[in-house]
């Protein structure tokens, strides 16, 4: 009798089925690992920094910004700028929206009736406050007038409410000066910027490391030095509340 040949089983061999299942499981495993590794880098950095501060949970708010804090905690958070000005407790945020800050500064100046002595604008550097010489100093002097102290105290209150760096610039007109105190406009403009910073720091207990004093002399006029009115406009002190995203290197 002829032996019957063993009938071959159709389809893939059994070991290939097992191997395919194993490879599929491994693929799913690595997909899960990848999906779990994709995190919000900004929030992760904020969390890591908060743990580095030992007292963060006792004295500081959460390092992660909630989308709607009032709903998260069931109560309304106070506006950092109180009615008629800025809160004296200051802000704990590292960055301030400069457009919103400009609006708050302009409102602050209006409420405190300071629009006649200070103007506020916005440029690439940040929020710019311009104080004319006649409101701060006598001609060719760098000692603050007594009449300048009240509104400088209010400027200090404004600066104490925000964490930004502050640059104070002294500017003069093109008329030459030469005396035993100030051999040129360079020394005069630098001394005026330093006087303003010293008063702000001492009267409002501000961190001196936040401030930079610069004297530009007559090198950056806003108008030609051709009339008496233009000379007055060029003699000024400029307070720049710096935009954190701005680099001084961009100005050169």
Image (spheres, grey):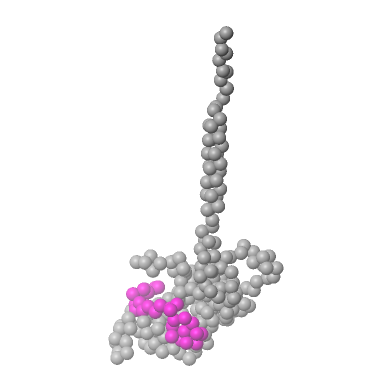
Q: Residue furthest front?
A: 1
Count of labels in the image: 0
Is residue 110 inside the magenta stretch? Answer: no
Residue 138 falls in image quadrant: bottom left
From the viewer's side, name the closer residue of 114 and 214. 214
From the viewer's side, name the closer residue of 61 and 164. 61
Q: Is residue 102 visible?
A: no
* 110 relative position to 210: left or right: right
Q: Position of residue 74 (x, y in %)?
A: 70, 68
Q: Position of residue 59 (x, y in %)?
A: 58, 76
From the viewer's side, name the closer residue of 59 and 147. 59
Q: Residue at x 56, y 30 (%)?
A: 14
Quadrant location, the N terminus:
top right
Quadrant location, the C terminus:
bottom left
Rendered position, 128 above or below 47: below
Q: Is residue 82 visible?
A: yes
Q: Position of residue 29 (x, y in %)?
A: 55, 46
* 161 relative position to 74: left or right: left
* 61 relative position to 235: left or right: right
Q: Residue at x 57, y 81 (%)?
A: 88
Q: Residue furthest top?
A: 1
From the viewer's side, name the closer residue of 96 and 38. 38
Is residue 220 inside the magenta stretch? Answer: yes
Q: Residue at x 32, y 90 (%)?
A: 181
Q: Residue furthest right?
A: 74
- Specify start and end residues of the magenta stretch as a single range: 196-225
Q: Residue at x 51, y 59 (%)?
A: 41
């Amino acid at each position: 009798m002829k032996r019957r040949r063993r009938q071959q089983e159709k389809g893939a061999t059994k070991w290939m089925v097992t191997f395919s299942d194993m490879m599929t499981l491994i693929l799913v495993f690595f997909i899960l690992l990848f999906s779990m590794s994709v995190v919000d880098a900004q929030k992760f950095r904020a969390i890591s920094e908060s743990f580095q501060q030992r007292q963060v949970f006792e004295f500081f708010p959460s390092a992660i910004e909630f989308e709607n804090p009032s709903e998260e905690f069931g109560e309304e958070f106070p506006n950092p700028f109180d009615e008629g000005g800025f809160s004296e407790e200051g802000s704990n945020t590292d960055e301030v929206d400069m457009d919103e800050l400009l609006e708050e500064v302009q409102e602050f100046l209006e409420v405190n009736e300071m629009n006649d002595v200070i103007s506020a604008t916005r440029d690439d550097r940040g929020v710019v406050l311009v104080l004319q010489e006649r409101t701060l100093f006598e001609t060719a002097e760098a000692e603050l007038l007594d009449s300048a102290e009240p509104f400088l105290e209010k400027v200090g209150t404004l600066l104490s409410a925000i964490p930004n760096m502050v640059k104070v610039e002294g500017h003069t007109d093109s008329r030459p000066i030469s005396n035993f105190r100030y051999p040129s406009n360079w020394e005069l403009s630098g001394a005026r910027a330093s006087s303003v910073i010293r008063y702000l720091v001492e009267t409002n207990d501000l961190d001196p490391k936040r401030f930079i004093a610069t004297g530009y002399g007559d090198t950056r006029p806003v108008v030609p030095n051709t009339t008496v009115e233009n000379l007055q406009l060029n003699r000024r002190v400029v307070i720049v509340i710096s935009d954190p995203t701005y680099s001084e290197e961009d100005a050169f």
